[in-house]
Image (cartoon, rainbow, N blue to C red):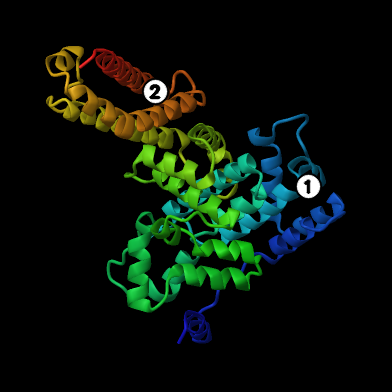
Amino acid sequence: MDHEGKIKAAIAGGYNLPALSPVAMEAVELASQEGVPAPKLAKVIERDPSLAARLLKLANSAFFRTGLPVGTLTQAIVKIGFERVRMMALSISLRDTFPMGKKGPMDYEKFWKLSLYRALIAKALALRLGSVHPEEAFVAALLEEIGFLVFYDLFVEGRVADPPLDLEDLDRLLLWERENFGMTHREVGKFVLSRWAFPERILACQEGGIRRERSGVTPENPLLAICDAATLIAKVLTSQQGDLPYAISRAALDAAISTEDIHTIVSSVFEEVEEIGAHLKIQVDRDRDVVAILEKANSALMRISQRVSECVGHEPRALPSMKTLEEDPSLATDVLQAVVHEIRNPLMVVGGFVKKLAQTLSPDSEGSRYVGVILEEASRLERVMEEMTKKLEKEREIPG
């Protein structure tokens, strides 16, 4: 039996696929049509008081704080814009369809937090690239792992002891699913999204992730490429592990933009994640997440410092000196090679990222105080690189 047959068999056995809000779906369809007046869309949304209240609250939030406060749904729709109304109505409906918090081995809160970061990063990437509609990128990335929740309900909950539910190790998770159930949650996700009548280009994003990682080939579908790049960054922002310089550099490569653009995008995401999260009922602590990412940046600098030390044979974390190179000039070439290939790029990535992130922090915040320590260390390492580079250039000038 193929994976679609297994899902249909489960449905026939009494499992009901989650149903999105009929009002939200009608609003999404209406908002996508040309020439629909705002009052007509408002009448549809009014039938769902929760959706109406949250859209009004969003229109009056700091995210849209321009001009006078709005008091009607029609005013809110005009202020937010039809495209964002579509995106928010769909996202709110999706979020309300599934639970929150931690229930048994399933951490729904962690799932939605990762999904929100991924969605906001994808939207920002789409805005920067101009190849994909930003709101479509938001929805595609928000839904990228939606099959995981349905798969858990269908095959795992109450049936498997200590299941591996870590989306941060997607390769291992999909392999476990395939070996034990003959299908993966991505295949379930594609089936569910097709039942919800999502367009094919969003369904195609269920094929991303490890396929691209294994092949090293950038997907031809720009929406898929954006979702893959967003996933790399979102995992670093929300997990305890993760190589920050690698993730930023790889995402920049996948999305064909600069690392500086990635820095700007991540900073913008931190500025809006709590605002959007509140309207989707997703719990996000922005300050805590900023400090966590700064700790990753600091760890990256410590690894860079240790690598420099290893290149010149010092004790761990002991920075090289000009005296060291003068005593053994033959080390200079090896040191510079290490700088160029292993140190300079990650150092520039981390330093640039922290400098950009610092602009979003209030001066008295814990994150702002941490930034100063990290930037001081980054500057010190930059000076070391500059000295080593000058030393090698000087050695080259001396005839051998």
Label of residue 371 in the image: 2
- The structure residue drawn at horizontal position 53% and vertical position 57%, both measured from the top left corner, is 219
> Could you say which quadrant of the image residue 340 lies in?
top left
- The structure residue drawn at horizontal position 42% and vertical position 59%, both measured from the top left corner, is 215
Q: Quadrant of the N terminus?
A: bottom left
Distance, label 2 to label 1, CA atoms, is: 42 Å
- Assign a secondary structure to mark 2: helix
- The structure residue drawn at horizontal position 36% and vertical position 33%, both measured from the top left corner, is 346
- Assign a secondary structure to mark 1: helix
Label of residue 282 in the image: none
Q: Between disc 2 and disc 1, whose residue precedes? A: 1
Residue 385 at x, y percent in the picture: 31, 20
Q: Which residue is mark 1?
A: 73
Q: Nearer the viewer, residue 30 or 227?
A: 227
Q: Is residue 337 left or right of residue 35?
A: left
Q: Quadrant of the C terminus?
A: top left
- The structure residue drawn at horizontal position 42% and vertical position 27%, both measured from the top left corner, is 354
